[in-house]
Amino acid sequence: MKRIENYDLSNQNTFRMKVKAALYIEYDNVEELQSLDLKALPQPVFHMGAGSNLLFTKDFPGTILHSNIKFIKYVDMGLDEVLLTVGSGVVFDDLIANVAGNGLWGMENLSLIPGEVGAAAVQNIGAYGVEAKDVISGVVCLDTKDWTKTVFKVGECAYGYRDSRFKHERGRYIITSVLFRVTRKYSPKLDYGGVRAALEGRDLQALTPMDVREAIIGIRNAKLPDPAQIGSAGSFFKNPVISREHFERFATPETPHYDLPDGTVKVPAAWLIDQCGFRGKVLGGAQVYEKQPLVIVNASGSASLEDVLALENQIIAAVQERYEITLHPEVDHI
């Protein structure tokens, strides 16, 4: 078990904010985690994954916990429906490469999203018409009240748009592994975000999960910054959901949107931000990414928290004034 005081978190958050934690603990298995006396650690105690969806607002005065539990175990590879259990510290995209490489469908549209398996189950990450909840079967946790093992079926996880019970009961449950359900049956999802266009000319009936994964990676690389090169936390804002009446007050036939089953409308936050003139806008060391206005980047490599928050607030105010829509950050502010 790794235990480091006054730990530099600069390389533990993809925004590359220069902050430190009073104590950093990385555990390799469930037994090491259970051995910790959380009340005796510097407070507060915060569990994080790869730091790909976080904005640290200052040095962290307490303890950062991080899982290094890494395994991928297939339960039965002989069935059409295949179950697997995965350690919370596995890089999520490594898992998708493994699953798609085995010819299994279900995860490929989530390719190249930064982060780890445990955090993916907390955040209910999603992209190109698929969310984590669509492939999660259950979540295995330790309840920090008494360190007992707790298993939640997917229906008990209260999953919503970038939401889950683990976000509302933050700190109580620490995810140690996640159960996934994927399939051998041909089941590509191509009708979202230009995926079908990226596969133009291909025999769609001959596609493999790896083919779709590679198309998704190509789309993402064309419009999203590589966190290894430019600091960011991915999509900074959630796509707002508004009433049909509200949408029709400003919409034209060209306005991008997604009609939801309950009659409401999801509007791409990137489009709203772009319409308000923020694409490429620079404020200090922070910038709205030119290729995708949903992303705020640490363009200088040394952006201050004040730069990022000021740019965030300017965007929220502009969209509210023009469209009467309040954007909410997808990125957790810590």
Image (cartoon, helix red, strand yellow):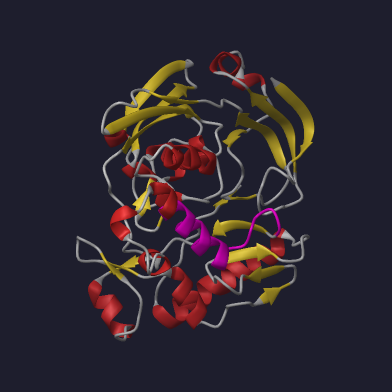
Residue at coordinates 61% horizontally, 15% vertically from top-left?
32
Determine whether, in the image, residue 48 is placed left or right of residue 61: left
Q: In the figure, is residue 77 to the left or right of 300?
A: left
Is residue 139 something that shows in the picture? Answer: no
- How far across and how far down the image is residue 147, in percent? 49, 16
Residue for point 42% across, 37% down = 102
Which quadrant is home to the N terminus?
top right
Between 216 and 239, the one lying in front of the other is 216
Nearer to the camera, 61 or 113: 113
Say which residue appears at 70% left-offset and 66% top-offset.
307
Of all residues, the one furthest to the left in this rendering is 262
Start and end of the magenta stretch? 212-229
The answer to if 64 sits in the magenta stretch is: no
Give the vertical position of 333 relative to 95 (above or below).
Answer: below
Inspect the magenta stretch and tell me whether residue 213 lies in it.
yes
Measured as percent of width and height from the top left, residue 269 is found at 45, 69
Q: Position of residue 244 (x, y in %)?
A: 24, 73
Depicted 187 relative to depicted 158: above or below: below
Query: Is residue 71 at all visible to an observer of this figure?
Result: yes
58 horizontally vs 81: left or right = right
| Type of secondary structure dominating the magenta stretch | helix
Q: Nearer the viewer, residue 171 or 68?
A: 68
Q: Residue at x 54, y 70 (%)?
A: 292
Q: Quadrant of residue 134?
A: top left
Q: Position of residue 196 (x, y in %)?
A: 36, 65
Residue 191 sits in which quadrant? bottom left
